[in-house]
Structures are given as structure tokens and as C-alpha cells.
Amino acid sequence: MAFVAFIGGLRRVAAAPALLLGAWGVTLAVLLGMQLVPGGAGAVHLRPAAAAGALAGIPQTFGPGLVGFQAVLSTLGDLYAGWPLGAANGIAAAGVVVWTFLAGGILDRLACQQRTAGAAFLATCRHHFWPLARLAALAGAVYWILFGGLYSWLLDDPSGAPVHLPTVSADAGPLRSALQVTFGAGVAGVGLLFDYARVRAVVEDRRSMVGALLAALRFVRRRPAAVAGLWLMNAVLTAAALAVWSLAASAAVSPAMRGAFVGGQLCIVVHLFAQLVAWASQTAYFQDQLAHATYTARARVPRSEPERPQ
């Protein structure tokens, strides 16, 4: 069933090209926004070297080490180098808010498999925004505990060296390597739990995010093999997208900037396609198990027409 859900996710995303186009536009806007650096007297200008990479779609630090969270955070850290703390936090917060707002409309469109007009899409986004914002706050708190507390307690260097995100090195001791792998698996499991909580919040129109998390936990616990298999297929697709992104990174600084720009944007589209497929396949699998292929709890009726009693 996991493979069927994965193929269903591919088909759902392929049938909704407007979602991919909109996601690309938002991503490009965020990347460009990251290049705006406050200068003296409130002036704003582009960092030339970093801006060239972002305009091509591939920030400079995306290279062979593009694995997991470390490359993403190192890229953002490089982009924010020298920024006032408020400016960096503002861009990061704006990106989170925008994607949280859009997530409800995207998941609803992937779930119902029907074309949605712009006004209806935005209305759906507004309807699901505050519940998903609460879920994002819960996720942020959990990740802060994991990375800010648990990881430091388990794997911090006694000499006081700064803590890095989990990357199993060749010279690490067996115990440390085992702890890193275990911690990474735990982080992946937490992410998977929040993914299904997001799906259940939108498809079932849930208002309580604690209830959505508990429902997601029950769903995953009863189908561990299929959920893990679907996650693995999506992980392979995402890894392939990141590999393409990494291989194309050198083109971002090549003399042929037009070709670099086109190649960079194509890499962004491939990466976003993989992310949308992950959301769509999880939605398809949930609907297949507990509902039907186009089920959403939120009825699609005109505002002027009252809902009929069931």
C-alpha cells in the first residue's frame, strides 16, 4: 500500500502544477529576501557574491556536504553573517509564517484533488492557519528540546567545543556514532509524527493540535512498516533532488549566468516537487486507510447555502 500511496502522491502533484509554480515563486522571493542586507542609515543593498548564487537558485554553501539539516543551517548562517539579530530573525520568522499559511491550502488541494480558485484557496489557507500555527509552535518547542537540550546532554564535547548537528564522522567512536544515528532516527520519527498530524489537522479539519498529534501517533503506531516504507521512498526522492541541487551548485558561479539561473531554478523546482510529493503521498495513504480518495471533513459549499444536516 505504501508504493500505491507514493505513486498516488506523484499523480496528485502532477495534476496540480499551480501548486508547484506558487511554491517556486514563494521560495524565490524568500531567497531574494535573504540577500537584502541592512546597510548604514537604513539603506538596503544586495550582497553581490551571495546574491549571484541565490539568483541562480543555489546558495553558495550548498555543496557536497548537503545532507540533512546541517547544510541548510550553515547556508542560512552564512547568509545572515553580519546581519543585525532582528533582521535575521525577521526573515526566518516571515518564511515560517508564509509556509505555515500556505500549508493548509496546499494539503487541502492535494486531498480533495479538485481545482481550487485563488479566492477559495486563500480562504482555505486562512481557515487552517491558526491550528497549523499552533502545531508549528509545538514542533518548534520539541525540536528546541531535542537540539538545545537532549543532543547537548548526549553528545556535547566535554572540552566545551560547540555542538554541531548530527553528522557521523569516520573517526567517531562506536558509542558516539551509535548515539548520533539513534538521535537522527528519533528526529526523523518526530518529523514524521508532525507530518501526519498536519495531514490529519487539514483533512479532518481538527482544531486541537494536541489531539491531532495523538491521532497521528495512533495512526503511525498501527502501521509502522507501511509508514516507514513510504517515508523511505520519499527520502530517496528527496535525496535525489538534493543530489541534483548539489551537483548543479558549481554552475551558480559560472560565467554563463543565464544558464546558471535556469539550472538553479530547475533544481529548486525539483526539490519542491519532492516535498510536495511527500505531503501528497502521506495524504493519499491516510485517506486510503481511514477515509476515501478525495475525503476532506470541511464541506465545500457556497457561503450563502447552509449545510444540510447529515
Image: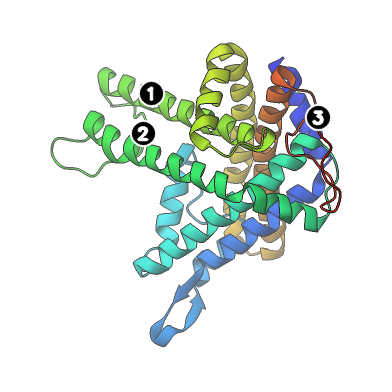
Contact (CB < 8 A) between labels 3 and 1? Answer: no
Tell me the element at label 2.
loop
User: Which numbered disc, 3 or 1, marks the residue that appears first in the sequence?
Assistant: 1
91 lies above or below 232: below
Q: Residue at x 79, y 36 (%)?
A: 112
Task: Give x and y (percent) for residue 32.
Answer: 58, 66
- Image-based side of 224 in relation to 169, left or right: right
Q: Quadrant of the C terminus?
A: top right
Instruction: Inspect the image, locate mark 1, and give the three-letter code of the amino acid beneath it.
Output: Val
Q: Quadrant of the N terminus?
A: top right
- Image-based side of 47 in relation to 22, left or right: left
User: Which numbered disc, 2 or 3, marks the residue that appears first in the sequence?
Assistant: 2
Q: Residue at x 69, y 54 (%)?
A: 24
Q: Residues within 10 Å of mark 2 (few under 14, many from 20)?
A: some
Residue matched to label 3 = 310
Residue matched to label 2 = 166
Task: Give x and y (percent) for residue 297.
Answer: 73, 34
The residues bearing labels 2 and 1 have C-alpha atoms spaced at a distance of 8 Å
Most foreground residue, 19 or 303: 303
Residue matched to label 1 = 181
231 lies above or below 166: above
Most foreground residue, 67 or 122: 122
Most foreground residue, 124 or 240: 124
Contact (CB < 8 A) between labels 2 and 1? Answer: yes
Most foreground residue, 189 or 36: 189
Q: How is the image coloured?
A: rainbow
Tell me the element at label 1.
helix
Instruction: Inspect the image, locate mark 2, and give the three-letter code of the amino acid beneath it.
Output: Pro
Tell me the element at label 3.
loop
Q: Quadrant of residue 219?
A: top right
- For the question of whether residue 140 can be seen, the reply is yes
The residues bearing labels 2 and 3 have C-alpha atoms spaced at a distance of 51 Å
